[in-house]
């Protein structure tokens, strides 16, 4: 896929469209990739939403070969960036360059919802690999552990976790 494959192409996804995956502890919640190379024809980035359950967190990690943009649009908590805490409220926007450690902590009684954009793509595959298929409207499952091969999935998908 190259620049020409995206010329004149548009994809519109509605809230229930596309894959959705329940996420393991410590994030719980679910991830909903929306725009990614297989549906856009463009291999430069992917985009989606991640919902972090109340009292849960996205573990500290970085991306060796990807940059990430995050926008909080529901809930509140903290984003830790290279060990520095920043308030996370609707409208908080983050640019996370290569190898920047970051962690999202939901400190509220409601779900925390983040929009993410990552370049190059691949986060959509990570969510599929560690998660379980979800259908909109399903009740959340009991918290479940990461897959036994989680460390290998992290490496394969460019996640750096300590």
Image (cartoon, helix red, strand yellow):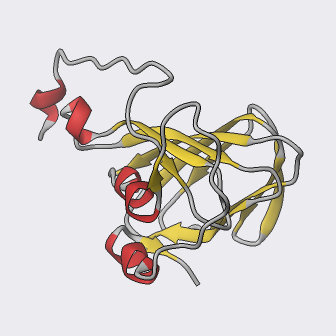
> Residue 25: x, y in percent?
64, 67
Q: Eyeballing the image, is 30 above or below 13?
A: below
Name the image quarter holding the N terminus: top left
Q: Is residue 24 left or right of residue 83?
A: left
> Residue 48: x, y in percent?
48, 38
Which residue is depicted at the point 87% across and 53% down?
A: 107
Which residue is depicted at the point 53% across and 73% down?
A: 146
Q: Is residue 65 left or right of residue 15?
A: left
Figure disc tally: 0
Q: Eyeballing the image, is 27 above or below 16?
A: below
> Residue 21: x, y in percent?
48, 49
Which residue is depicted at the point 48% across and 37% down?
A: 135
The reply to whether residue 99 is visible in this rendering is no
Q: Eyeballing the image, is 132 above or below 41?
A: below
Which residue is depicted at the point 74% across and 43% down?
A: 112
Q: Quadrant of residue 162?
A: bottom right
Residue nearest the viewer, comparing 131 with 42? 131
The reply to whether residue 154 is visible in this rendering is yes
Q: Is residue 153 left or right of residue 2?
A: right
Residue nearest the viewer, comparing 105 with 45? 105
> Residue 68: x, y in percent?
50, 51
């Amino acid at each position: 896929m190259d620049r020409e494959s995206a010329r004149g192409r548009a994809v519109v996804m509605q809230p229930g469209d596309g894959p959705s995956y329940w996420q393991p502890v410590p994030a719980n919640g679910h991830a909903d990739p929306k725009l990614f190379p297989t549906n856009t024809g463009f291999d430069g980035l992917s985009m989606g939403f991640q919902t972090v359950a109340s009292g849960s967190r996205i573990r500290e990690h970085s991306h060796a070969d990807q940059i990430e943009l995050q926008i909080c649009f529901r809930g509140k908590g903290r984003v830790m960036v290279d060990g520095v805490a920043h308030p996370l409220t609707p409208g908080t926007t983050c640019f996370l360059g290569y190898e920047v450690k970051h962690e999202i902590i939901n400190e509220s009684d409601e779900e925390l919802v983040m929009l993410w954009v990552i370049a190059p793509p691949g986060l959509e595959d990570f969510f599929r690999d560690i998660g379980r298929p979800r259908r909109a409207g399903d009740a959340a499952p009991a918290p479940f552990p990461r897959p036994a091969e989680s460390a290998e999935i992290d490496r394969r998908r460019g996640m750096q976790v300590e």
